[in-house]
Image: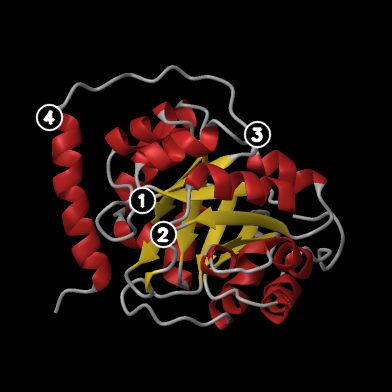
Amino acid sequence: MATILDRIIEEKHKEVQKLCEGNRVKVEAKPRRSFIQKLTETDEIAIISEFKRASPSKGIINSGADPAEQAARYEQAGASAISVLTDSSFFKGSFSDLRAVREVVNLPILCKDFIIDSSQIDMAAENGADIILLIVAALNQETLVKLYQYAQGLNLEVLVEVHNQVELEKALQIGAQLIGVNNRDLKTFTVSLQTTESLAKSIKDAGAFLISESGIHQKEDVERVRNAGANGILVGEAFMKSSDLSQSFKDFRLPLAGGIQK
């Protein structure tokens, strides 16, 4: 039986085919805003705040939100970086959302998508991304290596996403500096912060930065992943639904467990 991830990847192959049939623009390497640099300089949890209209697990989250307006609010509230969903079929996002955010903020921007081909990385770079997401569960090791190196060649940073120890070993094999632990299983979409707790030590021992993703809705959640060793968090739904964004950020901006650290 096909999982949600299977259906998403099947749709991505169709999108990639259309991209490859169109005119490909070779992107020139140019200066990017570094999220990794920010992580080396901060003594508090870094917050990647996400612009997300919808998701397969939650349905419509905030369909009327304007990407530029929301991103500007994120920057003003104290975000360290901004994530923009560019998947249209399942998350109601677009590359135009990415462009709109790039025009109004000076923060590093993560292109959040299910990337399976270099053409998608080109699109991310062309539209203003500084970071791309590579999901280990969606790629074989050969493709993971190829796309990781391709992104680096464009001066893009790469958030390599894992959900279990097997996937983490694959991320560590390619020397990933920035590892995202998705607390949501992309095959079942169940969520548990214990996923971050179980993988944190291996990530920290390898000297990589740990970003905890999904399932973070309140201060206690941030404290839990911070105490496990997270350098940062990626938060979408809680911020997209927040009635007091400034207060939400104040609640989440906690000091790192041991000060500036890797």
Discs 1, 2 touching: Cβ within 8 Å: yes
**What amino acid is labelled 1 in the image?**
Gly
**Disc 4 versus disc 1: distance between alpha carbons?**
22 Å
On the rendered structure, is 57 left or right of 7?
Answer: right
- Which is more toward the observer, 190 or 40? 190
Q: Can residue 214 be seen in this view?
A: yes
Mark 4 or mark 2: which comes first in sequence?
4
- Which is more toward the observer, 242 or 82? 242
Discs 4, 2 touching: Cβ within 8 Å: no
Percent position of residue 217, x then y: 61, 76
On the rendered structure, is 210 left or right of 161?
Answer: right
Q: Nearer the viewer, mark 3 or mark 2?
A: 2
**What residue is rendered at 62% in x and 78% in y?**
197
Q: Name the residue under label 1.
A: 93
Q: Quadrant of the N terminus?
A: bottom left
**What residue is rendered at 38% in x and 58% in y?**
136
Percent position of residue 201, x then y: 66, 70
Q: In which quarter of the image is residue 92?
A: bottom left
Mark 3 or mark 4: which comes first in sequence?
4
Q: Which of marks 3 and 4 is in front?
A: 3
Q: Determine whether 125 is above or below 88 in the image.
A: above
Q: What element carries label 2?
A: loop
Q: Name the residue under label 4.
A: 21
Q: Residue 53 carries which label?
A: 2
Mark 3 or mark 2: which comes first in sequence?
2
Mark 1 or mark 2: which comes first in sequence?
2
Q: Residues within 10 Å of mark 4 (few under 14, many from 20)?
A: few
